[in-house]
Structures are given as structure tokens and as C-alpha cells.
Amino acid sequence: MNINATLFVESVIFAIFVALTMRYIWPHILASLQEREADIRQGIEQSRQAELALSQANEQADEIIRDAQGKREGILKEARSEASLVIEEARRHTVSERNRLIQEAHSQIDTYTSEVKEGLVDQQLSHVQMLCRQLIGERYDPKILTQDVLDGFLANSKEDEQ
């Protein structure tokens, strides 16, 4: 066969192949490509929306964290002030309780001291009376003698205290 005829027949067959491909196969390929392109565009749009949502969520999280830190600082300040008030109240209570106990101790000491002094005075008076009775022999009235001795002893006690 002739090269021109072969080339012509091959060209006609190729044209028929291209026409059949364009008519029956190309629409399916084109539809698949368009579907794929739509899927890719949809994926890109979803990715952008997800990035936007993530950015908004991060901003909200940062705002929540700032609010929480502000509240935490407020709570800490309030707790510190309440703690200092409690400590100050405890100090005042402790000081007043200490002063009350000291006053009570002084009062008890004064009471005990006066009781001891009275006991000593009574004891010394009884000894003095006994000695006076032995020395004087019951010649004088004991009430008068006791009063004189008591007055003298109290005068000496006051001088000793000063």
C-alpha cells in the first residue's frame, strides 16, 4: 500500500477515535473532573471555615483565660484582705484575752496576798496575845490589848510597803 493511503486511513481512524472519545468518553471524564474540582473547592472552603472557627475559638479561649485570671486576682485580693482581717481580729482577741488573764492574775495575786497578810496578822496577833498573857498574866482586857497591837502592826506594815 501506498504511504499516503495508509496515512490517510490512519488519520480517518484517528479522527473517528477522537470523535467517539469526545462523544461518549469525554463527557464522563469531564464530569468526573468537575466533580473532583467541586470536591476540592468544597474541601478548601471547609478548611477556611475551620481555620476561621479555630481562630474565633482561640480568641474566645484567650478572653475566657483573661477573665478567669482577672477573677482569680480579685478572689486572691479578697482572700488576702479577709485573711488579714481574721489575723487582725485574732491578734486583738489574743491581746484582750491576755490583758484579761493578766488582770485576773493580778486580782488573784492581790486577793491571795491580802489573805496571806490577814492570816499572818491573825497568827502574829495570836502569838502576841499568847506572849502578852504569859507576860502580863491576864491583867489587862484582851480586846483593848489586841486593838493596840493590831494598830501598831498595821502602822508597821504600811511603812514596810512604802
Image (cartoon, rainbow, N blue to C red):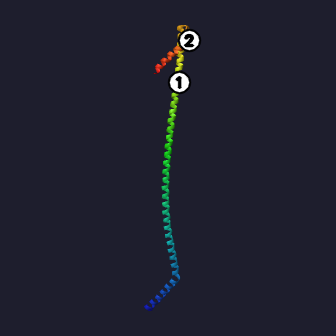
At x 43%, y 91%, the residue is 4
Dots 1, 2 in contact, CB < 8 A:
no
Percent of width and height locating residue 128: 52, 13
Tell me, for residue 142, which label it has, or none.
Answer: 2
Tell me what residue is drawn at x 51 percent, y 42 percent: 86
- Which quadrant holds residue 141? top right
Q: Is residue 51 above or below residue 162?
A: below
Quadrant of the image containing the C terminus: top left
Position of 121 compared to 4: left or right?
right
Nearer-the-camera pick, 160 or 3: 160
Q: Amino acid at mark 1?
A: Tyr
Coordinates of residue 22 in the picture (x, y in percent): 50, 83
Q: Is residue 129 above or below residue 116?
A: above
SS at mark 2? helix
Of residues 20 and 7, the one drawn nearer to the viewer in this rendering: 20
Closer to us: mark 1 or mark 2? 2
Image x and y of residue 55, in percent: 48, 63
Label 2 is placed on what type of residue? Pro
Q: Which residue is mark 1?
A: 112
Q: Which comes before the other along the chain, label 1 or label 2?
A: 1
**Position above or below: 145 against 87:** above
Q: Quadrant of the N terminus?
A: bottom left
Give SS at disc 1: helix
Residue 64 % position (x, y): 50, 57
Which residue is the extreme one toward the left? Answer: 3
Task: Please tell me whether residue 10 is drawn above or below residue 55 in the rendered image.
Answer: below
